[in-house]
């Protein structure tokens, strides 16, 4: 199966939704499979209901049976209570996304219980509102994630995509979600360490584990890199943690970023790639209407390839800054590379 980037996958999902088709996202642990449906829901301004299929057994999917008797003299018959996780128009609206996460980790009997829902959008007494779409996600058998072989009838009711995170998509997401600037800069400097899944290791680098590193750094009371190493290695492994700390030690040598932006003329040029990655990323986090003019002056003092990194970071955080006169001039001058 060909891999697909997050940006292209989101477009595919939106097309599937318009066509009334179900989507299945495959991929290794920690690469952002669960984040994609949430992003699509936000972009389309739709509600999202999600649950983990592996927490259900076949009876749960159809609903708990109970006796129903419309009137005192009528015959009793069995009906099923609608599972609370399924969308109900009166409660959840006429349109939305139902996200079934971890579908392959559910036993085959449970996966088969979803067949009718995937095909006819009905199950037992339940009928899904017409405006709702189904997205599923999960790991492959090769990911050592305790998954089951998906039954062929279930496979045939889904559009299948194998997600592969890309640096550009992740960097955009990281800027938009206030990931630590050193983490963003390091991943741009060492892109092969964004995602290096290993079933044989306790900790390994993934987009999710680097986001955890960012959270850990924000709460780290001690700025001692030797102390920080243990926290980072617990999330991404010893090797990547060692490289990150070495990078961070270089980044720590940066002058005060706010002062550099305030007086760009005092910036002393440096050819160290690691430091330039750190500088471009840190400056991008300070971009706003009040600082953009000085930031553009500073940009002119660094190599053009790092200007591009800086500008992409700025646009990820605030696309409206494209309208600034100095930014428009830079885009025009660098249209052949930007």
Image (cartoon, rainbow, N blue to C red):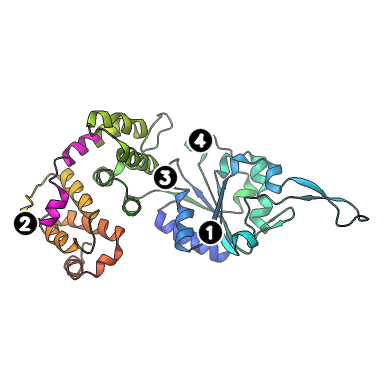
- 85 vs 254, left or right, is right
Q: Where does label 3 land, which residue?
A: 31
Within 10 angstroms of label 4, few (less than 14), some, or many (20 or more) residues?
some
Mark 3 or mark 1: name the one nearer the start of the chain. Answer: 3
Nearest the eye: 51 or 330: 51
**Callout 3–callout 4 Cβ contact below 8 Å:** no
Within 10 angstroms of label 1, few (less than 14), some, or many (20 or more) residues?
some
Q: Where does label 1 land, which residue?
A: 47
Mark 4 or mark 1: name the one nearer the start of the chain. Answer: 1
Within 10 angstroms of label 3, few (less than 14), some, or many (20 or more) residues?
many
Residue extending farthest to the right is: 73
Nearest the eye: 54 or 48: 48
Q: Where does label 4 land, which residue?
A: 145
Please tell me which residue is depicted at 41% across the width and 29% down the height of the picture: 202
Q: State the image quarter where residue 250 is shown.
A: top left
Residues under labels 3 and 1: Cα distance? 23 Å
Q: Where does label 2 land, which residue?
A: 265
Nearest the eye: 217 or 160: 217
Q: Is residue 155 above or below residue 225?
A: below
- Please tell me whether residue 229 belongs to the stretch shown in magenta: no
Please tell me which residue is depicted at 40% across the width and 57% down the height of the picture: 7
């Amino acid at each position: 199966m060909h891999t697909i980037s997050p940006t292209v996958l989101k477009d595919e999902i939106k097309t599937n939704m318009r066509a009334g088709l179900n989507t299945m996202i495959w991929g290794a642990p920690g690469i952002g499979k669960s984040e994609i449906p949430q992003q699509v829901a936000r972009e389309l301004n739709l509600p999202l209901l999600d649950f983990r299929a592996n927490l259900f057994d076949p009876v749960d999917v159809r609903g708990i049976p109970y006796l129903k008797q419309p009137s005192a003299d009528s015959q009793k018959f069995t009906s099923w209570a609608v599972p609370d996780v399924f969308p109900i128009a009166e409660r959840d609206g006429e349109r939305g996304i139902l996200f079934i996460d971890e579908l392959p980790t559910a036993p085959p009997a449970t996966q088969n219980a979803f067949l009718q829902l995937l095909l006819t959008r009905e199950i037992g007494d339940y009928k899904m509102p017409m405006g709702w779409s189904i997205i599923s996600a999960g790991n492959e058998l090769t990911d050592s994630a305790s998954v089951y072989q998906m039954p062929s009838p279930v496979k045939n009711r889904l559009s299948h995509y194998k997600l592969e995170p890309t640096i550009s998509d992740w960097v955009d997401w990281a800027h938009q979600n206030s990931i630590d600037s050193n983490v963003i800069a390091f991943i741009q400097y060492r892109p092969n360490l964004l995602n290096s899944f290993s079933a044989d290791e306790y900790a390994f680098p993934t987009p999710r584990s680097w986001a955890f590193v960012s959270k850990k750094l924000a709460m780290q009371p001690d700025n001692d890199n030797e102390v920080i190493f243990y926290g980072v290695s617990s999330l991404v492994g010893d090797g990547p943690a060692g490289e990150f700390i070495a990078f961070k030690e270089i980044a720590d040598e940066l002058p005060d970023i706010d002062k550099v932006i305030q007086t760009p003329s005092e910036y002393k040029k440096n050819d160290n790639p690691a430091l330039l990655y750190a500088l471009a990323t840190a400056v991008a986090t300070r971009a706003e209407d009040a600082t953009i003019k000085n930031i553009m002056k500073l940009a002119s003092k660094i190599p053009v390839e790092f200007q591009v990194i800086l500008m992409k970071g700025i646009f990820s955080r605030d696309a409206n800054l494209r309208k600034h006169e100095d930014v428009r001039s830079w885009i025009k001058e660098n249209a052949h590379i930007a």
